[in-house]
Structures are given as C-alpha cells and as structure tokens.
Image: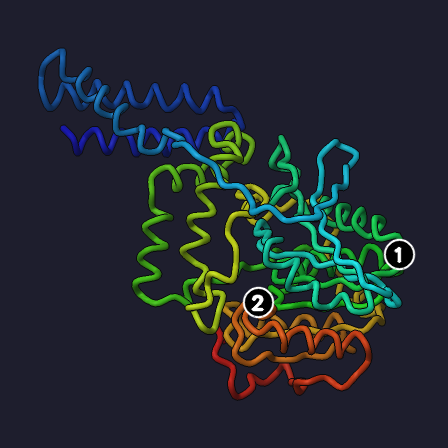
Amino acid sequence: MIIAAVGISAVAALIMIWVAGLSGSLLWSVIAGLLITLLLSLIIGLLLLRDVLGPLMIFGLALLLSLSWLYPGSGAVRPDAVAGIEWITRPDGSRLAVHVTRASAATQPPMIAVHGGPGVADMTHDAPAFAALASDRDVYVYDRIGTGASARLPDPTGYTMARAVQDLEAVRVRTGASQVVLHGHSWGALIVVAYAQRHPDHVAALVLSAPSDLPFGGAQPVPGDLTTRLDGGQKTRLYLQLMRPRNLFAYALTSADARVAHSVAGDREMDRRFARIYRASTPALFCDERLADRVGTSGVGFYAHYVPQLHPDPSDEPLDAQRLTMIKVPVLVIKPACDYLPWSSIAAYQRAFPQAKFVMVPGAGHVAYLEQPELYVGLVHAFLTGQQLPLPTTDVTTIPDGYRGTQ
C-alpha cells in the first residue's frame, strides 16, 4: 500500500507539472493533481484491499506523502550586510543595490562589475575584491535584479537579457560618465557583451573573466557543468540536495511554467533552497577547494538564475558577431587554469573581438579574482593602464601547459 501511495503521489506531481506547462494555470494544475490522485486511489484501493476503506486509506497516505514535495519549509536566506549600499530605483519601482568604491583621485573611466550566475550575487566578497582597482577610477559593484539585496520581480519571466542590459545602463547613468569599463564575470560576460552591442559608445574597455560560451544568432548559451570539478563525495552531497522532492518539484515546475512555479514556491523559499545547493557546489569554483569559503552563497536568486536559462526571451536581441567586431575598444579575456567551463568556451570571443588579449591565470578556479586576488588585480590594472601584463597572452586555439580545467 505504501508503494502504491508513493507512486500515486509521484504521478500527481508529474500531472501538475504537465498541466501547468499546458495551461499556465495554477488552478487547473491543482485540480488535475487532485483528480488523478482520487482516481488512482479509487482504482488501486479497490484492487488491493477490495474494501470501501481501501481507496480512502491510499488517498490519505498519498496526500501525506505528497507533503514531501508540497511543504515549503521555513526560514530565509539574506545577503550579508554590506556598508555603503546605494539604491537605484527603476521605472517599475524595483530597486538595485549598488556599492561604490571611490578613488581618491578618479582620472580614468569608472568600472562596473557584473556578477555571474546569472543569479549568483556576492557583493560581500566582490566589493572588497574589486575595490583594489579603485586607485585611479571609481568601482561599482551591483546586485542584478532578483539577486542579493536587490528587489525580486513579482513576475519571474521579467528576468531577461533585455532587462539585464537596461539595468546595466541605469548603473552607467548613475556613474555620471559617458564611458565605463565593464567587468563581466561568467554569465555576466554575456550581459556585458550584449550591453556593448547595444551601447558601444558607452564602453571604454571590456574585461571578461571566466566567460561562458558566446552564442550568436539567437542560439542559447550552454551552461557549464560544475560537477566536473567535484570528487565523488562532493557530488553525492550535491545530488542529495538536488534530489529532495520539493527541490525537484519546484525546478520541474519552473521549467514548465515559471509563473505557476513562483506562485507555488516564492522567492523567499527558493532562494533559501538554492543557497544550500550552491553551497554544495562551491568547491568546484576553486583550484584549491579548501578556499571555498571565500565565496558567499547568501546572495543567490533562484528565479533570476534559472528562468533566463530555462525560458530565454525570444524578443531578446541576438548577439551578432559582425556588429561586435566593429567595437574597437580594448578587450581582456581571462581564463582561470582550473575553470569548470571548458577551454573551448572562449573561442567565440576571438571571433567577436579580434583585438582581444587572452590570458590564463595559474592556480585559480572559476572565481580567479577571489582565489588569486593580487595577481588578478595586477593583471586587470596593467591592462587598463596600458602597461605590460604580468602574465603572458595565449593562443585560444591551443590549450596551454598548466591548464587543469575542463577541456
């Protein structure tokens, strides 16, 4: 009877997800889940127990087991407090959290750092890391909408590339500068490149750190696989988090219809759940996994992270390699030696930016600026000031000696 109830509960969850994807309606999804639970309980209860109480017992047990994927749990995750946060209010009333490190004498265009994920903000660590570059320029670090201290959108389908570019332009306007240096990390590199395509006149230079693949012509970026940098025990801990019934249900429902998922599992709950999952994966971000605590997990945004990957907006302007080649500003592409993103992911940047310099940072994982901060800052500073780089440039068509990341 327990096995039957488990099966019925699982089928009910699948039916709810399927109907949500078809109808976009939470009501119809719930009705369908209840009806299939009643129907299967009636049929299996009569077959197994041959008694009028059989269907009621199985139905009740199935409902009880369904709490494993229906109960939201309690608690919340809040980003660590960062002193000196400023706020930018967007036209829809949502607010962006921005941290500014002022240079004592700002003589160069300000730099804006765009985090990756796409829904992984870490201002607690990023702000001090990039503050070291504020010797001759102001440095801006902000939490993208739906992450960190910034607002969550009431409609999760609003997390689009177009919105990301608009928000980045709002931060650029806040700087008061006509041109800015853009530092894009991981998925943030895609946002920076999309911004440069849209607003080339506002870009002074591009620094692209551990960038994900650059898709052209409307193709979708392929997410990297963090598990390639995890050992067996670490993978097990990660999978145990991922396989929790509520986590599986919420992710699958988000894949089917983000609005329905958001009404069932809100930001407070899913950010908390995502933070635990992300924490289990952080050893993959470093060459030396013992440094995993250098990255924070309290600024994640579940829907800001997964909706752009599961439901890319067809109205987003596709990246055009030919248009990008017309952007003649200096470009630095930084590839960490222990990156979980494959070496091949940087090849498209040579096509888009023939003038780009490519540098591998030794002894650094995906978050090279946190694992090798002095080397990283020295590299970026030398690039932006036109000095000789402290590391050699590399040919992207050949994997260099010393590269230990995914190939």
Quarter residue 114 falls in:
bottom right
Front residue of 90 and 34? 90
- Residue found 69% across the figure and 77% down from its top: 378
Image coordinates of residue 289 in percent, x first then y, are 43, 68
Q: Quadrant of the N terminus?
A: top left
Does 215 sit above or below residue 338?
above
The residue beneath circle 2 is 370
Q: Secondary structure at mark 1?
A: loop
Image coordinates of residue 176 in percent, x first then y, are 88, 52
Residue type, mark 1 in image: Ala
- Residue found 57% across the figure and 52% down from its top: 120
Residue type, mark 2 in image: Leu
Does 402 sit above or below residue 223?
below
Quarter residue 201 falls in:
bottom right
Front residue of 2 and 33? 2
Image coordinates of residue 389 in percent, x first then y, are 72, 84
Q: Secondary structure at mark 2?
A: helix
Q: Residues within 10 Å of mark 1 (few under 14, many from 20)?
A: few
Q: Which mark is residue 177?
A: 1
For marks 2 and 1 on the same chain, the one whose residue lies earlier in the sequence: 1
What distance separates the C-alpha of mark 2 from that of mark 1? 28 Å
Does 84 sit above or below residue 66?
below
Front residue of 26 and 296? 296
Does 239 sit above or below residue 156?
below
User: Is 345 on the left-hand or right-hand side of 182?
Assistant: left
Res 306 visible: yes
